[in-house]
Image (cartoon, rainbow, N blue to C red):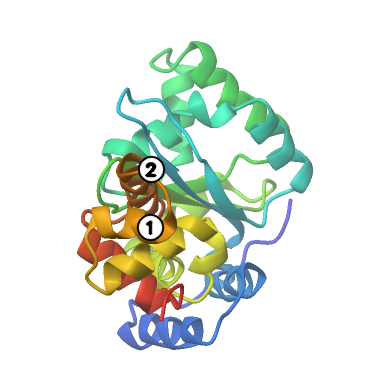
């Protein structure tokens, strides 16, 4: 069995602020993943997966985007089979607020509280060695939800790891919220959210105070198309309004 090291898990505001400071200089996905990996390692976790999932008006999932350091073969299998649609943890992130231990989810499967496709996803993850961890829902606006899972050594003692998490839940959760804010607002967001060229143009004209009809004339397109592109930009930026979308785009450096 792998050796499991214990660490001083006293909540530290300085540690959270230090991570926030480090994230300011990150300009790419690999960099932000490296920062988080270094931060979570002392807590007994060696990898993570961060996901942001918009839903359409009918509640269907679309535009699943993620950042992860898990086994690439598992993630390819997970995404190719759209397993996030039946993932109990992904569904929990839509309504939950507190972190959930994977051991608690496993107990629900073993006692028949979680069955069918949801149980299949968790069982498949276990078969791939993705079995010790926690998932924390993250706040979003509009029809978007997000969450992050921290994954530990599959050979570590789950009960021991759970005890360590409970002792450090406050600083871990605070750190993960800082990470979420870093992705939402940092330089990496430009690539992470992937706005189209036309969506950026619409936001730029909106930032200068032009109305939809005027933007349509400038872009030589219809009012309906501009409205559709503006709505898509708000969704990608997880913004509740045009003004918030413009503000976030400016902070991210997407528009000047």
Question: Residue 98, relative to residue 30: is it above or below?
Answer: above
21 or 248, nearer to the observer: 248
Quick one: quadrant of the C terminus? bottom left
Element class at badge 1: loop
Q: Quadrant of residue 124?
A: top right
How far is mark 1 from mark 2, CA to CA? 18 Å
Residue at screen point 48% across, 57% down: 198
Question: How far across and how far down the image is residue 234, in percent?
Answer: 33, 53
Which percent across, then down, holds residue 158? 55, 45
Q: Which mark is residue 58?
A: none
**Pointer 1 with pointer 2, Cβ within 8 A:** no
If you read the primary sequence from the N terminus, does the residue marked by circle 1 or circle 2 appear first?
2
Looking at the image, the residue that sits furthest to the right is: 73
Give the secondary structure at mark 2: helix
Picture residue at 51% right of the left edge, 74% below the top: 7
**Residues packed near mark 1 inside 10 Å, few (<14), some (14 to 19) or many (20 plus):** many
Give the residue at mark 1: 237
Report crowding for label 2: few under 14, some 14 to 19, many 20 or more residues within 10 A (C-alpha): few
| Residue at horizontal 44 percent and vertical 35 percent from the top | 89
The answer, for residue 30, to whether it is visible in the render is: yes
Residue 143: give x, y in percent of width and height. 29, 40
Res. 136 visible in picture: no
The residue beneath circle 2 is: 225
In depth, the one of 201 and 184 nearer the eye is: 201
């Amino acid at each position: 069995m792998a050796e499991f090291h214990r660490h001083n898990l006293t909540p530290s505001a300085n540690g959270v602020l230090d991570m926030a400071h480090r994230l300011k200089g990150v300009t790419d996905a690999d960099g932000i993943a490296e920062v988080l990996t270094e931060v979570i390692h002392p807590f007994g976790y060696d990898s993570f997966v961060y996901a942001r999932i918009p839903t359409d008006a009918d509640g269907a999932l679309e535009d699943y985007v993620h950042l992860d350091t898990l086994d690439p073969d598992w993630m390819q299998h997970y995404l190719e089979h759209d397993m996030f649609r039946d993932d109990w943890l992904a569904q929990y992130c839509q309504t939950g607020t507190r972190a959930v231990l994977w051991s608690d989810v496993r107990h629900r499967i073993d006692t028949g509280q979680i069955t069918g496709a949801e149980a299949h996803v968790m069982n498949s993850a276990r078969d791939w060695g993705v079995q010790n961890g926690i998932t924390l829902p993250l706040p979003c606006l509009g029809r978007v939800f997000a969450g992050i899972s921290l994954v530990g050594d599959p050979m570590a003692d789950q009960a021991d790891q759970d005890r360590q998490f409970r002792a450090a839940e406050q600083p871990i959760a605070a750190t993960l919220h800082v990470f979420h804010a870093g992705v939402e607002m940092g330089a990496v967001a430009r690539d992470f959210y992937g706005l189209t060229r036309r969506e950026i143009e619409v936001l730029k004209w909106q930032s200068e105070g032009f109305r939809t009809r005027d933007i349509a004339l400038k872009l030589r397109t219809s009012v309906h198309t501009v409205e559709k592109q503006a709505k898509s930009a708000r969704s990608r930026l997880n913004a509740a309004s045009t003004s918030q979308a413009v503000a976030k785009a400016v902070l991210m450096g997407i528009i000047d």
